[in-house]
Image (tube, grey):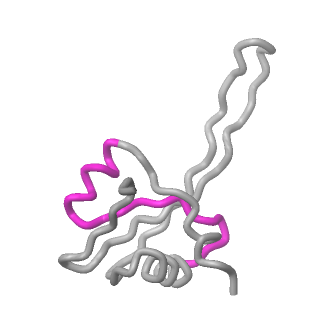
Amino acid sequence: MRDHRDVILLPVVSEKSYDMLEEGVYTFVVAPNASKTEIRDAVETIFDVSVLKVNTLNRKGKRKRERRSNRWVRTSDQKRARVTLAEGDSIDLFGA
């Protein structure tokens, strides 16, 4: 069993993820080989909340052109998890 902090890598900061915070849905970048049960256990252990639902999605990296060398490079693939918390639970992502 691996450490819970190796499963949850970082929170996603975007307009869409901020809009979903009001509904109790939090988005995280997770390890590529993490399962839904591992993600559930990690969020419950790290943030001391109860998780209702976990949805995962794999995002392919984009193909971009480097400006200086005129080569095509590819950004890395990501696996994200949308975690729905129980009513009344919340996570303070940016608190001190």
Look at the image and tell me in which quarter the C terminus lies.
bottom left
Read off the magenta span.
Answer: 15-35
Please state if 48 lies on the left or on the right of 25 as rendered. right
Residue sticking out furthest to the top: 68
Where in the figure is residue 92, as x and y percent of width and height?
33, 62
Please state if 16 lies on the left or on the right of 9 as rendered. left
Please state if 85 lies on the left or on the right of 68 as rendered. left
Where in the figure is residue 55, as x and y percent of width and height?
42, 70
Residue 62 or residue 41, whichever sits in front: 41
Where in the figure is residue 83, as x and y percent of width and height?
38, 70
Relative height, residue 26 to residue 89 (above, below): above
Relative height, residue 93 to residue 65 (above, below): below
Q: Quadrant of residue 75?
A: top right
Look at the image and tell me in which quarter the N terminus lies.
bottom right
Relative height, residue 49 to residue 83 (above, below): below
25 is within the stretch colored magenta: yes
Residue at 25 percent across and 80 percent down: it is: 86
Please state if 5 lies on the left or on the right of 87 as rendered. right
Residue 35 or residue 7, whichever sits in front: 7
Where in the figure is residue 87, as x and y percent of width and height?
19, 78
Residue at 77 percent across and 15 percent down: it is: 70
Residue at 58 percent across and 61 percent down: it is: 9
